Image (spheres, rainbow, N blue to C red):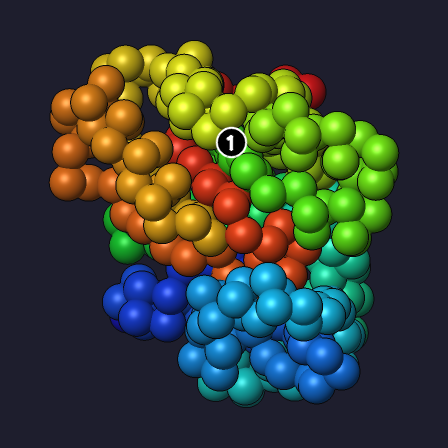
Amino acid sequence: MSDYILSCSASCDLSPEWTKKRDLHYVNFNITVDGKSMKDDMGISLSPRELVKMMQAGAECKTSMVSIGEYVDYFRPFLDAGKDLIHVSLSSGISGTFNSARQAGEMLREEYPDRKIYIFDSLAASSGYGLLMELAADKRDEGLSVDELAEWIESNRLNIRHWFFSTDLSFYIKGGRISKTAGTVGQVLNICPLLDVDLEGRLIPREKIRTKKKVVKRIVEKMIEDADGGLNYNGKVFISDSDIELGNQVQSLIEEIFPQLKGKIVRFDIGCTIASHTGPGTVALFFYGKKRVN
Protein backbone atom coordinates (compact mmCIF):
# COMPACT_ATOMS: atom_id res chain seq x y z
CA MET A 1 0.00 0.00 0.00
CA SER A 2 1.41 3.36 -1.04
CA ASP A 3 1.89 6.16 1.48
CA TYR A 4 0.32 8.64 -0.94
CA ILE A 5 -2.94 8.96 -2.86
CA LEU A 6 -3.10 8.96 -6.66
CA SER A 7 -6.20 10.86 -7.70
CA CYS A 8 -8.06 11.96 -10.82
CA SER A 9 -11.61 12.83 -11.89
CA ALA A 10 -14.44 10.76 -13.35
CA SER A 11 -13.79 12.41 -16.72
CA CYS A 12 -10.74 10.17 -17.19
CA ASP A 13 -13.30 7.72 -18.63
CA LEU A 14 -12.16 4.51 -16.97
CA SER A 15 -14.67 2.56 -14.87
CA PRO A 16 -15.34 2.19 -11.13
CA GLU A 17 -14.11 -1.40 -11.31
CA TRP A 18 -10.92 -0.39 -13.08
CA THR A 19 -10.10 2.46 -10.70
CA LYS A 20 -10.69 0.20 -7.70
CA LYS A 21 -8.40 -2.46 -9.16
CA ARG A 22 -5.66 0.13 -9.78
CA ASP A 23 -6.19 1.96 -6.44
CA LEU A 24 -7.06 5.23 -8.17
CA HIS A 25 -9.33 7.71 -6.40
CA TYR A 26 -11.60 10.05 -8.36
CA VAL A 27 -13.81 13.08 -7.85
CA ASN A 28 -17.16 13.23 -9.67
CA PHE A 29 -17.90 15.81 -12.35
CA ASN A 30 -21.18 17.72 -12.63
CA ILE A 31 -23.66 17.40 -15.49
CA THR A 32 -27.17 18.71 -16.09
CA VAL A 33 -29.66 16.79 -18.23
CA ASP A 34 -32.85 18.66 -19.14
CA GLY A 35 -32.33 20.92 -16.13
CA LYS A 36 -31.75 18.06 -13.69
CA SER A 37 -28.39 18.12 -11.87
CA MET A 38 -26.56 14.80 -11.91
CA LYS A 39 -23.09 13.43 -11.28
CA ASP A 40 -20.70 11.99 -13.79
CA ASP A 41 -19.54 9.19 -11.49
CA MET A 42 -18.24 6.82 -14.18
CA GLY A 43 -21.67 5.52 -15.07
CA ILE A 44 -22.95 4.59 -11.62
CA SER A 45 -25.82 7.10 -11.68
CA LEU A 46 -26.25 7.32 -15.46
CA SER A 47 -24.52 5.19 -18.07
CA PRO A 48 -22.86 7.06 -20.94
CA ARG A 49 -24.74 4.90 -23.46
CA GLU A 50 -28.05 5.93 -21.91
CA LEU A 51 -27.01 9.58 -21.95
CA VAL A 52 -26.21 9.40 -25.66
CA LYS A 53 -29.65 7.88 -26.32
CA MET A 54 -31.23 10.72 -24.36
CA MET A 55 -29.26 13.27 -26.39
CA GLN A 56 -30.40 11.66 -29.63
CA ALA A 57 -33.97 11.96 -28.36
CA GLY A 58 -33.48 15.70 -27.79
CA ALA A 59 -32.22 15.99 -24.20
CA GLU A 60 -30.29 19.17 -23.35
CA CYS A 61 -26.98 18.40 -21.65
CA LYS A 62 -24.56 20.76 -19.94
CA THR A 63 -21.47 20.23 -17.82
CA SER A 64 -19.90 22.25 -15.02
CA MET A 65 -16.46 21.95 -13.50
CA VAL A 66 -15.73 20.81 -9.97
CA SER A 67 -15.66 23.83 -7.66
CA ILE A 68 -12.85 24.81 -5.28
CA GLY A 69 -15.04 23.86 -2.32
CA GLU A 70 -15.85 20.46 -3.80
CA TYR A 71 -12.14 19.79 -4.26
CA VAL A 72 -11.35 20.86 -0.69
CA ASP A 73 -14.01 18.48 0.64
CA TYR A 74 -12.71 15.69 -1.58
CA PHE A 75 -8.99 16.17 -0.75
CA ARG A 76 -9.34 16.72 2.99
CA PRO A 77 -10.02 13.11 4.12
CA PHE A 78 -6.82 11.91 2.42
CA LEU A 79 -4.77 14.56 4.19
CA ASP A 80 -6.51 13.90 7.52
CA ALA A 81 -5.46 10.26 7.13
CA GLY A 82 -1.82 11.38 6.92
CA LYS A 83 -1.46 10.71 3.19
CA ASP A 84 0.40 12.80 0.66
CA LEU A 85 -1.51 13.52 -2.55
CA ILE A 86 -1.02 13.61 -6.32
CA HIS A 87 -4.12 14.80 -8.13
CA VAL A 88 -4.22 14.96 -11.94
CA SER A 89 -7.00 17.03 -13.49
CA LEU A 90 -8.85 16.99 -16.79
CA SER A 91 -7.04 19.12 -19.37
CA SER A 92 -7.11 22.87 -18.82
CA GLY A 93 -7.52 23.13 -22.58
CA ILE A 94 -11.12 21.98 -22.32
CA SER A 95 -12.13 22.72 -18.72
CA GLY A 96 -11.40 25.19 -15.94
CA THR A 97 -11.33 22.42 -13.35
CA PHE A 98 -7.51 22.44 -13.09
CA ASN A 99 -7.59 25.97 -11.71
CA SER A 100 -10.18 24.95 -9.11
CA ALA A 101 -8.04 21.99 -8.04
CA ARG A 102 -4.90 24.12 -7.95
CA GLN A 103 -6.53 26.76 -5.74
CA ALA A 104 -7.91 24.09 -3.43
CA GLY A 105 -4.42 22.61 -3.18
CA GLU A 106 -2.94 26.00 -2.27
CA MET A 107 -5.49 26.46 0.50
CA LEU A 108 -4.86 23.02 1.94
CA ARG A 109 -1.06 23.33 1.88
CA GLU A 110 -1.42 26.10 4.44
CA GLU A 111 -3.67 23.92 6.58
CA TYR A 112 -1.52 20.78 6.20
CA PRO A 113 2.10 22.06 6.02
CA ASP A 114 3.52 18.58 6.61
CA ARG A 115 1.73 17.02 3.66
CA LYS A 116 2.93 16.98 0.05
CA ILE A 117 0.19 18.05 -2.35
CA TYR A 118 0.82 17.90 -6.09
CA ILE A 119 -1.82 19.15 -8.53
CA PHE A 120 -1.19 18.45 -12.21
CA ASP A 121 -2.88 19.41 -15.45
CA SER A 122 -3.11 16.17 -17.43
CA LEU A 123 -3.24 18.03 -20.77
CA ALA A 124 -5.34 15.02 -21.70
CA ALA A 125 -8.97 13.98 -22.03
CA SER A 126 -11.26 10.95 -21.85
CA SER A 127 -9.44 7.62 -21.69
CA GLY A 128 -6.20 9.32 -22.79
CA TYR A 129 -6.35 10.99 -19.40
CA GLY A 130 -7.22 7.54 -18.09
CA LEU A 131 -4.16 6.04 -19.79
CA LEU A 132 -1.94 8.63 -18.09
CA MET A 133 -3.43 7.55 -14.74
CA GLU A 134 -2.96 3.88 -15.64
CA LEU A 135 0.72 4.37 -16.43
CA ALA A 136 1.18 6.52 -13.31
CA ALA A 137 -0.35 3.67 -11.26
CA ASP A 138 2.17 1.29 -12.85
CA LYS A 139 5.02 3.57 -11.82
CA ARG A 140 3.63 3.93 -8.30
CA ASP A 141 3.43 0.14 -8.01
CA GLU A 142 7.04 -0.12 -9.16
CA GLY A 143 7.88 1.78 -5.99
CA LEU A 144 8.28 5.39 -7.09
CA SER A 145 8.02 7.88 -4.24
CA VAL A 146 5.48 10.69 -4.34
CA ASP A 147 8.19 13.10 -5.54
CA GLU A 148 9.50 10.69 -8.16
CA LEU A 149 6.02 10.01 -9.52
CA ALA A 150 5.25 13.73 -9.66
CA GLU A 151 8.38 14.19 -11.77
CA TRP A 152 7.40 11.26 -14.02
CA ILE A 153 3.91 12.70 -14.67
CA GLU A 154 5.38 16.11 -15.48
CA SER A 155 7.86 14.56 -17.92
CA ASN A 156 5.58 12.04 -19.64
CA ARG A 157 2.10 13.56 -19.89
CA LEU A 158 2.73 14.88 -23.42
CA ASN A 159 3.67 11.37 -24.57
CA ILE A 160 0.06 10.26 -24.23
CA ARG A 161 -1.24 10.41 -27.79
CA HIS A 162 -4.90 11.05 -28.58
CA TRP A 163 -6.55 10.50 -31.94
CA PHE A 164 -10.30 10.53 -32.34
CA PHE A 165 -12.98 11.05 -34.91
CA SER A 166 -16.69 11.73 -35.05
CA THR A 167 -19.14 10.56 -37.68
CA ASP A 168 -22.06 12.64 -36.35
CA LEU A 169 -21.49 16.40 -36.37
CA SER A 170 -24.92 17.39 -35.11
CA PHE A 171 -23.86 17.91 -31.50
CA TYR A 172 -20.73 19.80 -32.53
CA ILE A 173 -23.03 22.16 -34.45
CA LYS A 174 -25.48 22.36 -31.57
CA GLY A 175 -22.74 23.20 -29.09
CA GLY A 176 -21.20 25.84 -31.35
CA ARG A 177 -17.90 23.98 -31.83
CA ILE A 178 -18.59 23.80 -35.58
CA SER A 179 -20.52 26.47 -37.49
CA LYS A 180 -23.92 25.44 -38.79
CA THR A 181 -22.81 26.02 -42.38
CA ALA A 182 -19.58 24.04 -42.07
CA GLY A 183 -21.33 21.28 -40.15
CA THR A 184 -24.16 20.95 -42.64
CA VAL A 185 -21.72 20.77 -45.56
CA GLY A 186 -19.69 18.22 -43.64
CA GLN A 187 -22.72 16.03 -43.05
CA VAL A 188 -23.76 16.17 -46.70
CA LEU A 189 -20.25 15.18 -47.80
CA ASN A 190 -19.91 12.48 -45.10
CA ILE A 191 -16.98 14.32 -43.55
CA CYS A 192 -15.56 12.65 -40.44
CA PRO A 193 -13.11 15.08 -38.80
CA LEU A 194 -9.97 13.54 -37.32
CA LEU A 195 -8.76 15.37 -34.23
CA ASP A 196 -6.01 15.16 -31.65
CA VAL A 197 -4.89 17.02 -28.52
CA ASP A 198 -2.23 19.72 -28.77
CA LEU A 199 0.51 20.88 -26.40
CA GLU A 200 -1.99 22.93 -24.40
CA GLY A 201 -4.47 20.08 -24.07
CA ARG A 202 -6.94 21.50 -26.59
CA LEU A 203 -8.93 19.39 -29.04
CA ILE A 204 -7.69 20.32 -32.52
CA PRO A 205 -9.18 19.20 -35.89
CA ARG A 206 -6.31 17.92 -38.03
CA GLU A 207 -7.88 16.31 -41.11
CA LYS A 208 -11.24 16.17 -42.87
CA ILE A 209 -11.84 12.66 -44.10
CA ARG A 210 -14.76 11.42 -46.16
CA THR A 211 -16.53 8.19 -45.11
CA LYS A 212 -16.32 6.08 -42.00
CA LYS A 213 -14.21 3.40 -43.67
CA LYS A 214 -11.48 5.89 -44.57
CA VAL A 215 -11.36 7.56 -41.16
CA VAL A 216 -11.07 4.17 -39.40
CA LYS A 217 -8.08 3.40 -41.63
CA ARG A 218 -6.56 6.85 -41.08
CA ILE A 219 -6.74 6.77 -37.27
CA VAL A 220 -4.75 3.53 -37.26
CA GLU A 221 -2.23 5.04 -39.68
CA LYS A 222 -1.75 7.82 -37.12
CA MET A 223 -0.98 5.19 -34.49
CA ILE A 224 1.68 3.69 -36.77
CA GLU A 225 3.22 7.17 -37.18
CA ASP A 226 3.08 8.23 -33.55
CA ALA A 227 3.34 5.11 -31.37
CA ASP A 228 6.54 4.46 -29.42
CA GLY A 229 8.42 2.05 -31.71
CA GLY A 230 5.96 2.37 -34.60
CA LEU A 231 4.77 -1.03 -35.79
CA ASN A 232 6.74 -2.67 -32.97
CA TYR A 233 4.64 -0.91 -30.32
CA ASN A 234 3.70 -3.31 -27.55
CA GLY A 235 2.51 -0.89 -24.90
CA LYS A 236 -0.93 -0.20 -23.54
CA VAL A 237 -3.78 0.87 -25.83
CA PHE A 238 -7.10 2.29 -24.68
CA ILE A 239 -10.12 2.90 -26.90
CA SER A 240 -13.18 4.83 -25.76
CA ASP A 241 -16.25 5.28 -27.90
CA SER A 242 -19.91 6.18 -28.14
CA ASP A 243 -20.35 3.80 -31.10
CA ILE A 244 -19.51 0.18 -30.30
CA GLU A 245 -19.43 -1.01 -33.91
CA LEU A 246 -17.02 1.69 -35.03
CA GLY A 247 -14.89 1.01 -31.95
CA ASN A 248 -14.85 -2.67 -32.95
CA GLN A 249 -13.64 -1.75 -36.43
CA VAL A 250 -10.77 0.34 -35.06
CA GLN A 251 -9.78 -2.41 -32.63
CA SER A 252 -9.87 -5.11 -35.34
CA LEU A 253 -7.69 -3.08 -37.68
CA ILE A 254 -5.14 -2.37 -34.93
CA GLU A 255 -4.96 -6.07 -34.07
CA GLU A 256 -4.48 -6.90 -37.76
CA ILE A 257 -1.62 -4.43 -38.18
CA PHE A 258 -0.17 -4.84 -34.66
CA PRO A 259 -0.67 -8.61 -34.04
CA GLN A 260 1.34 -8.34 -30.80
CA LEU A 261 -1.53 -6.24 -29.37
CA LYS A 262 -4.25 -8.83 -29.98
CA GLY A 263 -6.17 -9.34 -26.75
CA LYS A 264 -4.41 -6.44 -25.01
CA ILE A 265 -6.53 -3.47 -26.13
CA VAL A 266 -8.77 -2.13 -23.36
CA ARG A 267 -12.17 -0.63 -24.18
CA PHE A 268 -14.17 2.01 -22.27
CA ASP A 269 -17.23 4.13 -22.90
CA ILE A 270 -16.74 7.82 -23.55
CA GLY A 271 -17.96 9.14 -20.21
CA CYS A 272 -20.90 11.44 -19.58
CA THR A 273 -18.85 14.65 -19.30
CA ILE A 274 -17.12 14.22 -22.66
CA ALA A 275 -20.15 12.60 -24.35
CA SER A 276 -22.24 15.64 -23.40
CA HIS A 277 -20.14 17.59 -25.91
CA THR A 278 -19.30 14.99 -28.57
CA GLY A 279 -22.54 13.00 -28.74
CA PRO A 280 -22.83 9.74 -30.70
CA GLY A 281 -20.54 8.40 -33.41
CA THR A 282 -17.24 9.17 -31.69
CA VAL A 283 -14.24 6.83 -31.36
CA ALA A 284 -11.04 7.80 -29.55
CA LEU A 285 -7.72 5.95 -29.63
CA PHE A 286 -4.98 6.39 -27.01
CA PHE A 287 -1.44 5.05 -26.69
CA TYR A 288 2.04 6.05 -25.47
CA GLY A 289 4.13 7.58 -28.21
CA LYS A 290 6.27 10.39 -29.52
CA LYS A 291 5.94 13.57 -27.48
CA ARG A 292 3.40 16.02 -28.92
CA VAL A 293 5.04 18.87 -30.82
CA ASN A 294 2.08 21.11 -31.73
Q: Secondary structure at mark 1?
A: strand
Residue 145 seen by the camera: no
Residue 212 picture location, percent across and down = 46, 29
Residue 62 picture location, percent across and down = 74, 68
Residue 266 seen by the camera: yes
Instruction: Please tell me which residue lies in front, 19 or 171.
Output: 171
User: What amino acid is found at the position of numbered circle 1 in the picture?
Assistant: Trp
| Residue at left offset 75%, top offset 36% | 183
Does 20 sit left or right of 85 as displayed? left
Give the residue pinned by disc 1. 163
| Residue at left offset 83%, top offset 40% | 180
- Quadrant in which the C terminus is drawn: top right
Q: Is residue 135 above or below residue 223?
A: below
Instruction: Please tell me which residue lies in front, 154 or 143.
Output: 154
| Residue at left offset 69%, top offset 47% | 170
Residue most extreme to the front: 188
Does 102 sit left or right of 8 as displayed? right
Instruction: Please tell me which residue lies in front, 85 or 90.
Output: 90
Residue 177 picture location, percent across and down = 79, 43
Does 193 sit left or right of 12 as displayed? right
Number of residues whose C-alpha sits closer than 10 Å to that of mark 1, classed few (under 14), some (14–19) or many (20 or more)? many
